[in-house]
Image: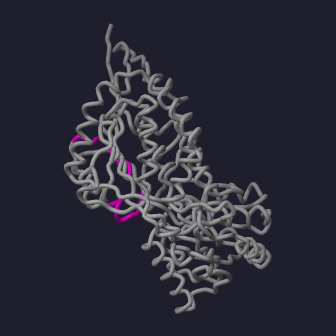
C-alpha cells in the first residue's frame, strides 16, 4: 500500500499472494487493506487536497510531464513487472506502459484549458462560471489493463485539482504501486495519490462508503458495478461505471478480408482476449464466410502461446484460475451440447511448462446458436464465436441483441453501409474498418449494460469538476 507518499502495511498481518499466471511463481505478498487503511488513505487525501487544489494546473501538468519521462526511461523494467503479474506478452506490456505515459502527457497538454465562462445577462449584468475540483476521488480498477486504466482514472482527476485513492485488483497491484511511486518521485505531493491493496468486499466497499469520497470511477464486472452504484447513491456521490462488453464485429462481403482477418485476430486474442473492447462476437456475410474463416483459422493457428516473458510469444496465459475455469466450462458446454463447431483450439496447449500456468489455446467456434452463452455473456478469454449472416440488416439485428453496448465495428468499403452501421449499432464506440483501439483523445464508455459516464478526451474533465455560477450586477 502507499499512503501519504509512503509504503504502508507490512505483511506481518493479513496478506495475499501475487503470482505469475504463467508459472505459478510467487512474486510478492501484499497487505490486505482494511477499513482502517482506507480511512487513513482518505484522510491523507483530504489533508493534501487544499494544497494540491491551489496549485496551478500548469504546475500539476509539469508533474505529469516529468513522470511520463521517467516511465518511458523505465519502460523495460515496468513492462517486465506488468508481464510477470498479469501474463500478457512483453510487446503488449510495453505498449501499455507507453500508453500510461501518453495519457499523462495528453492531460498535461490540457492543463491550460481548465476555465469557466463569461455570460452577459441582459438586464441583470453579467454571469461567470468557475470550475472547482470535487475533493477526494477514488477508483476501483481491474487486472486486465492495470497500468492503462490507472492512467485513465487518475490523470483527469489529478490535473483538475482533486486528490485520489486507488484500489487496484488483488492479482495485479505491483505495477500500480510502482507507477504511483514514480509520480511521487516526479513531484506529486504526499497524500495526493494513495494506493490501497485489498479485496473488493472489504477495501472496495469501505472506499465507496467513505463520506469524504466525492466521486467513484469503477471498471469491472456488471454485478459489482451495480453494487458500487447502489452504495454511492446513498452518499450522493458521482459515479462512472465501465462494465465491460460483448463487442460485435461485422464483416461485409465487400470488406478487405486480409485486413478484417488481422483485425479479428488482434481484436480477439490481444491480452488473451481479456479486454473490455475485444471482439467477442463475429458476424460474417455468408457469401464470404468460407474464405474468411479459412484465412482466420490459418492466422489463429500461427499464434504462439507461451510465457509472456519469451520474446516470440503472441498470446500469454489467462490471468487467474477463475478465468481459466470459466473458459474451460464454456468450451466444454459447446462440445457437450453441440452448440457450435470448434474450428481450432478448444483445449490446454501442450508445451514445456504449460501445466504450471493458466494457458488455453486461441479458439474459434462456428455455427453458434443465438442462445449460446458465447453470444450472451462477456467472454473474457481467447474464444471467438462466429455467426454467418445474410446481410447487414441481419448482422445489426443480431449484434444489437446483446444486453451490452460498449463497442462494435463494421468492415466494408461502402460508405452507405458504414454510415448504416454507425447509426444503427447500439454501442458507445463504433469503429469502421478497425476495432479495439481506444485513444486518450476521444471519449470512451458504454451504453445499456456496459455502464454510463465517459473516460478520456477533454470532456471527461467535467466529471471531476463542479461548476459554480457567479451573478454580478453593475
Q: Residue at x 59, y 66 (%)?
A: 307
The question of residue 103 being in magenta is answered with no
Q: Residue at x 57, y 62 (%)?
A: 271
Q: Residue furthest top?
A: 474
Q: Position of residue 62 (x, y in %)?
A: 50, 26
Visible in this render: residue 448? no
Visible in this render: residue 155? yes
For the C terminus, the image quarter is top left
Q: Residue at x 39, y 18 (%)?
A: 121
Residue closer to the observer: 284 or 40: 40
Residue 313 occupies quadrant: bottom right
Tell me where the magenta segment starts and ends, as one range: 212-226
Q: Is residue 380 above or below residue 111?
A: below
Residue 467 occupies quadrant: top left
Q: Is residue 410 above or below residue 215?
A: below
Q: Position of residue 238 (x, y in %)?
A: 32, 44
Residue closer to the observer: 146 or 30: 30
Q: Could you tell whether 148 is left or right of 42 in the image?
A: right
Residue closer to the observer: 401 or 144: 144
Amino acid at each position: 500500500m502507499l499512503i501519504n507518499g509512503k509504503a504502508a502495511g507490512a505483511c506481518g498481518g493479513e496478506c495475499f499472494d501475487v503470482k505469475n499466471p504463467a508459472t505459478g511463481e510467487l512474486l510478492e505478498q501484499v497487505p490486505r487493506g482494511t477499513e482502517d487503511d482506507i480511512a487513513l488513505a482518505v484522510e491523507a487525501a483530504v489533508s493534501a487536497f487544499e494544497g494540491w487544489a491551489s496549485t496551478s494546473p500548469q504546475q500539476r501538468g509539469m508533474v505529469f510531464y516529468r513522470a511520463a519521462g521517467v516511465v518511458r526511461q523505465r519502460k523495460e523494467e515496468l513492462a517486465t513487472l506488468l508481464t510477470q503479474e498479469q501474463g500478457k506478452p512483453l510487446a503488449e506490456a510495453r505498449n501499455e506502459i507507453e500508453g500510461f505515459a501518453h495519457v499523462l502527457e495528453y492531460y498535461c497538454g490540457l492543463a491550460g484549458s481548465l476555465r469557466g465562462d463569461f455570460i452577459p445577462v441582459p438586464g441583470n449584468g453579467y454571469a461567470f462560471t468557475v470550475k472547482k475540483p470535487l475533493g477526494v476521488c477514488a477508483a476501483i480498477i481491474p487486472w486486465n489493463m492495470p497500468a492503462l486504466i490507472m492512467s485513465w482514472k487518475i490523470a483527469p482527476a489529478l490535473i483538475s485539482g482533486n486528490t485520489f485513492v486507488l484500489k487496484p485488483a488483488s492479482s495485479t497491484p505491483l505495477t500500480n504501486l510502482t507507477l504511483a511511486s514514480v509520480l511521487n518521485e516526479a513531484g506529486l505531493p504526499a497524500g495526493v495519490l494513495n494506493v490501497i491493496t485489498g479485496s473488493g468486499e472489504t477495501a472496495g466497499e469501505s472506499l465507496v462508503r467513505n463520506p469524504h469520497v466525492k466521486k467513484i470511477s469503477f471498471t469491472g464486472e456488471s454485478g459489482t458495478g451495480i453494487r458500487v452504484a447502489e452504495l454511492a447513491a446513498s452518499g450522493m456521490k458521482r459515479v462512472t461505471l465501465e462494465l465491460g462488453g460483448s463487442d460485435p464485429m461485422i464483416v461485409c462481403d465487400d470488406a478487405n478480408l486480409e485486413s478484417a482477418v488481422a483485425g479479428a485476430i488482434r481484436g480477439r486474442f490481444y491480452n488473451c482476449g481479456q479486454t473490455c473492447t475485444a471482439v467477442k462476437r463475429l458476424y460474417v456475410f455468408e457469401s464470404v464466410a468460407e474464405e474468411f474463416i479459412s484465412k482466420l483459422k490459418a492466422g489463429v493457428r500461427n499464434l504462439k502461446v507461451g510465457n509472456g516473458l519469451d520474446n516470440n510469444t503472441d498470446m500469454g496465459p489467462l490471468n487467474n484460475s477463475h478465468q481459466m475455469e470459466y473458459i474451460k466450462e464454456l468450451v466444454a458446454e459447446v462440445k457437450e451440447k453441440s452448440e457450435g463447431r470448434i474450428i481450432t483450439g478448444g483445449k490446454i496447449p501442450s508445451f514445456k511448462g504449460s501445466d504450471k500456468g493458466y494457458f488455453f489455446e486461441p479458439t474459434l467456434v462456428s455455427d453458434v446458436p443465438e442462445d449460446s452463452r458465447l453470444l450472451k455473456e462477456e467472454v473474457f478469454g481467447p474464444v471467438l464465436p462466429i455467426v454467418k449472416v445474410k446481410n447487414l440488416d441481419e448482422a445489426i439485428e443480431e449484434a444489437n441483441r446483446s444486453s451490452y453496448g460498449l463497442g462494435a465495428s463494421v468492415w466494408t468499403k461502402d460508405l452507405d453501409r458504414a454510415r448504416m452501421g454507425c447509426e444503427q449499432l447500439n454501442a458507445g464506440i463504433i469503429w469502421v474498418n478497425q476495432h479495439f483501439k481506444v485513444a486518450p483523445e476521444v471519449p470512451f464508455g458504454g451504453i445499456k449494460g456496459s455502464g454510463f459516464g465517459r473516460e478520456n478526451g477533454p470532456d471527461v474533465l467535467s466529471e471531476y469538476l463542479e461548476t459554480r455560477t457567479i451573478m454580478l450586477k453593475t
